[in-house]
Amino acid sequence: MKQVKGMKEFIREEDGMGTVEIILIIVVLVGLVIIFKSQITQIINTLFQKITSQTNTV
């Protein structure tokens, strides 16, 4: 009985670790977006300008 109970606890712990890992990944991604916000904005604006100029030629 102790082994079955131990296995159930182990499975529950793994689910919690997955949640923590996902939250940490999201926090890191949000941090990177905040740090590089101006560079990302410039890249997106440049891409939209190129798309707009090239659609006029088609």
Image: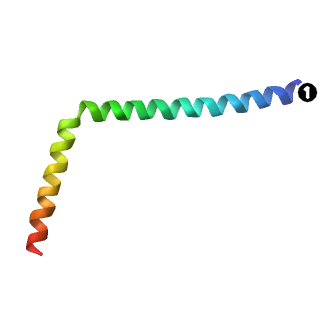
Total marks shown come to 1
Q: Is residue 43 left or right of residue 10?
A: left
Residue shown at 30% from the left, 33% from the top: 32
In the rendered image, residue 20, in percent from the top left (x then y), is placed at: 54, 29
Q: Nearer the viewer, residue 3 or 52?
A: 52
Q: Is residue 58 left or right of residue 26?
A: left
In the rendered image, residue 48, in percent from the top left (x then y), is placed at: 16, 56
Q: How is the image coloured?
A: rainbow
Q: Is residue 49 left or right of residue 9?
A: left
* Residue at the far right in the pictured view: 1
Q: Amino acid at mark 1?
A: Met
In the rendered image, residue 8, in percent from the top left (x then y), is placed at: 78, 31
Tell me the quarter of the image containing the C terminus. Answer: bottom left
Picture layout, residue 31 above or below residue 48: above
Tell me the quarter of the image containing the N terminus. Answer: top right
In the rendered image, residue 18, in percent from the top left (x then y), is placed at: 58, 34
Q: Write down the quadrant of residue 53 in the picture.
A: bottom left
Residue located beneath label 1 in the image? 1
Question: The residue tagged with tag 1: helix, strand or loop?
Answer: loop
Q: Write down the quadrant of residue 37 in the picture.
A: top left
Residue shown at 11% from the left, 57% from the top: 49
Residue shown at 85% from the left, 30% from the top: 4
Q: Check disc 1: other Cα within 10 Å, few if <14, some if 14-19, many if 20+.
A: few
Residue shown at 35% from the left, 34% from the top: 30
